[in-house]
Image (cartoon, rainbow, N blue to C red):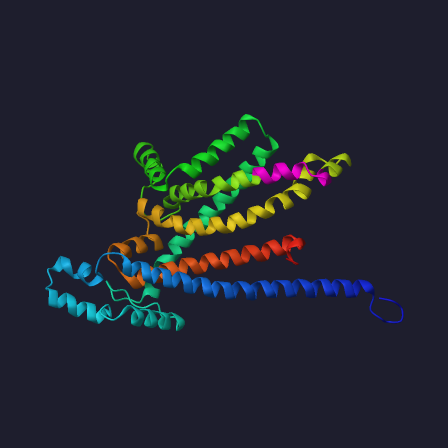
């Protein structure tokens, strides 16, 4: 600050920069929240329509095994509100959502929110463990493949990426159970009682999720390593490790952050298949059972919850990208 006590230009610049950053963050958050609201409304509407277009009657599905009469089935449909016109059902459904009420299960008559929150921790545990493995394998193999481009390491990483993208989850899961549970007897095939039960499903989902990240990191890092500022850094005599970690990785990994956000949503969706194959408790098993029993409120609540988590994760990724890349703040 000058001797006369007036603020300096540096103070104004830093203050304006900080205010501009805050403004960009606030605009982004507000814009994304508005878009998220419309997205959730669209998803809720789509799920509502699809579940009612699919063949099958929830009341008949639930009561058929007990040999109930047509009159009993009709009474059950009336109690469930399934005999009302679709616009009436849709309006009541949206009104309940606006109040935070996901309804009650048609099969167990328990609140849908309670059913979901009981199983959600198992799914979050699996998704987070898979995401850690996805990031570790994707970034690690992607960087190694870029540094040794054209070598056998690069070809091996490319093979792993193609294998991960093209192999179905359920088939890979059955192979893992056969090898590590039945043949080697190293890991349990089902359940969620300890960390050993988490290894196979987390590794399976993590490897599948890492496949596109390997290719993206490799491609971006190869392009970045040929940039002019990397050449200048090397000409100054900086060690190759320092050039890679300080100058190349930051710019090369920024696009990977967006992909990691997308992969987080993929991993949440992948738990449906994985939890079924490994007989794990979780939201995936709840959704599968609800679809089989035509338990409409449970399916709708689970889909909305997964969509909300996906939107929150991608908003967080966008905010992190703005913090790391100043060029995005004016976009």
Give percent across and percent down for residue 210: 48, 41
Vertical placement of 72 versus 122: above or below? below
Dividing the picture into quadrants, the one containing residue 95 is: bottom left
Between 9 and 130, the one lying in front of the other is 9
Tally of numbered discs = 0
226 is within the stretch colored magenta? yes
Q: Quadrant of residue 245?
A: top right
Q: What is the residue that sits farthest to the top in this orientation? A: 152
Q: Can you say which quadrant of the picture contains the N terminus?
A: bottom right
Q: Is residue 21 magenta?
A: no
Image point (41%, 49%), residue name = 126
**Which residue is at the front of the view, 281 or 218?**
218
- Magenta segment boundaries in residue numbering: 218-230
Q: Position of residue 131 (x, y in %)?
A: 47, 47
In the image, taking residue 222 as reference, residue 206 lies left or right, namely left
Is any part of residue 253 visible from this angle? yes
Residue that appears at 17% across and 61% down: 60
Q: Is residue 117 visible?
A: no
* Quadrant holding the C terminus: bottom right
- In-front residue for pair 78/14: 78
Q: Give the residue at x 32% y 58%.
A: 50
In this rendering, would 121 be left or right of 235? left
Residue 280, image x, y percentages: 33, 49
In the picture as drawn, the residue positioned furthest to the right comes out as 3
The spot of residue 253 in percent (x, y) is 60, 45
Please determine whether, in this image, residue 291 is positioned above or below residue 92. above
């Amino acid at each position: 600050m000058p001797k006369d006590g007036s603020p300096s230009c540096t103070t104004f610049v830093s203050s304006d920069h900080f205010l501009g950053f805050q403004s960009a963050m606030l605009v982004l958050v507000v814009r994304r929240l508005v878009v998220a609201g419309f997205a959730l409304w669209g998803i809720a509407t789509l799920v509502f329509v699809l579940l009612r277009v699919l063949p099958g009657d929830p009341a008949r599905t639930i009561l058929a095994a007990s040999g109930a009469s047509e009159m009993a089935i009709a009474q059950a449909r009336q109690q469930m509100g399934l005999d009302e016109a679709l616009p009436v059902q849709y309006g009541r459904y949206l009104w309940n959502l606006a109040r935070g009420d996901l309804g009650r299960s048609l099969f167990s008559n328990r609140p849908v929110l309670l059913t979901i929150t009981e199983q959600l921790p198992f799914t979050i545990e699996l998704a987070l463990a898979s995401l850690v493995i996805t990031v570790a394998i994707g970034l690690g193999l992607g960087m190694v493949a870029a540094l040794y481009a054209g070598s056998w390491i690069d070809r091996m990483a490319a093979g792993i990426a193609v294998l991960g993208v093209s192999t179905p989850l359920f088939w890979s899961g059955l192979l893992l159970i056969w090898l590590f549970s039945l043949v080697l007897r190293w890991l349990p095939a089902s359940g969620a009682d300890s960390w050993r039960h988490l290894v196979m499903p987390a590794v399976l989902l993590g490897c599948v999720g890492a496949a596109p990240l390997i290719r993206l990191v490799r491609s971006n890092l190869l392009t970045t390593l040929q940039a002019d500022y990397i050449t200048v850094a090397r000409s100054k005599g900086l060690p190759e490790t320092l050039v890679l970690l300080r100058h190349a990785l930051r710019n090369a990994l920024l696009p990977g952050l967006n992909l990691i956000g997308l992969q987080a949503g993929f991993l949440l969706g992948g738990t449906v298949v994985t939890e079924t194959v490994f007989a794990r408790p979780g939201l995936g098993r709840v959704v599968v059972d609800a679809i089989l029993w035509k338990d409409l409120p449970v399916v709708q609540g689970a889909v909305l919850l997964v969509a909300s988590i996906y939107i929150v994760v991608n908003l967080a990724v966008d905010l992190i990208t703005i913090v790391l890349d100043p060029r995005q703040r004016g976009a």
